[in-house]
Image (cartoon, grey):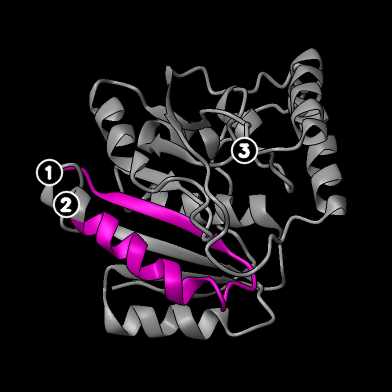
Amino acid sequence: MRTLYIVVPCYNESECLPQTAPVFRRELADLTAAGLAGPDSRILLVDDGSADGTWEIIRSLHEGDPAFSGLRLSPNRGHQNAVMAGLMEARGRAEVTISIDADLQDDITAMAEMMKKHAEGYPIVCGVRSSRESDTFFKRFTAQSYYALMNLFGAKLIYNHADYRLMDRSALDKLALYHDEDPFLRGLAARLGLPIATVEYVRAPRVAGESKYTLKKMVKLALRGLTCGRCKPESTPRPPDPHIAERLFS
């Protein structure tokens, strides 16, 4: 039974977490009951320097249930750095990680299929949106153009895949060799030279709260993607994140 850490970046999610945390917990219990995750599996909530009560909620969840663990970053480091911090923290604790956003727009039930794909021998499994029918024409057009441009500049991305992703320890060991201060994880995952499987799912509306990806942040992420193809691995793993202000583990 593989120890699984579900890595969840959280930024100002005080409205969302009380609703989604029980869903994460039930899914972890289901995975454990099905023999897909071991009894030491955890939900690792990464507070990315939130200005609301997100960290207090994470602390309360941890105190009430050891299945919840927590990291607090200070100051706000951005979504990709929060995911990276969680993955690197889980690297020495788990055989498998799955990163997913706190709002549960990504279908959490797809985790079971991801774990099955991993058991078949895939160290990386990417969650992929099955369609963009709910998007406007403009959003579909810009998304298609974005992926075409990324691939043109060497960032070989999987279409309709963001950061809902399984990575096992072998993949994390390779990812740890990239020391980028501002990582582009969906691009780096495709550059590790490991077999990748995909699992399709239907993307849902946010459960609560608002998206934290402003237009400025989306443009910044897109520009970061353009340079991803030039990223080179180092010979030693990246050092511990100096911006981790607090850890909660049982």
Are discs 2 and 3 less than 8 Å apart at CB? no
Q: Calculate the distance from the C-alpha at mark 2 to the C-alpha at mark 3.
A: 27 Å
Q: Count neighbours of disc 1 (C-alpha within 10 A) and say few if under 14, some if 14 to 19, many if 20 or more.
A: few
> What residue does disc 3 label?
185
Mark 1 or 3, nearer chain start: 1
Q: CA distance from mark 2 to mark 1?
A: 5 Å
The residue shown at (63%, 32%) is 132
Crowd band around label 3 with a 10 angstrom C-alpha radius: few (<14), some (14–19), many (20+): some
Report the residue at 26% width, 74% height from top.
66
Residue at the spot of label 2: 32
Q: Which residue is mark 1?
A: 35
Number of numbered markers: 3
Disc 2 marks a residue whose amino acid type is Thr
* Secondary structure beneath label 2: helix
In the image, is 132 to the left or to the right of 27? right
Q: Is residue 25 magenta?
A: yes
Q: Amino acid at mark 1?
A: Gly
Q: Are marks 2 and 1 in contact (CB under 8 Å)?
A: yes
- Stretch of the chain drawn in magenta: 1-29
Where residue 89 sits: x, y (%)? 45, 56
Camera-side mark, 2 or 3: 2
* Residue visible at 57% across and 53% down in the picture: 205
Q: Is 75 colored magenta in this rendering?
A: no
Q: Quadrant of residue 157?
A: top right
Q: Nearer the viewer, residue 160 or 166?
A: 160
Q: Mark 1 and 3 residues: CB-CB less than 8 Å, in contact?
A: no
Farthest-out residue, top? 152
Image location of residue 155, percent across then percent down? 72, 22
Q: Position of residue 214 (x, y in %)?
A: 81, 56
Comparing 61 with 224, the one in front is 61
Q: Label 3's element?
A: helix
Q: Is residue 239 visible?
A: no
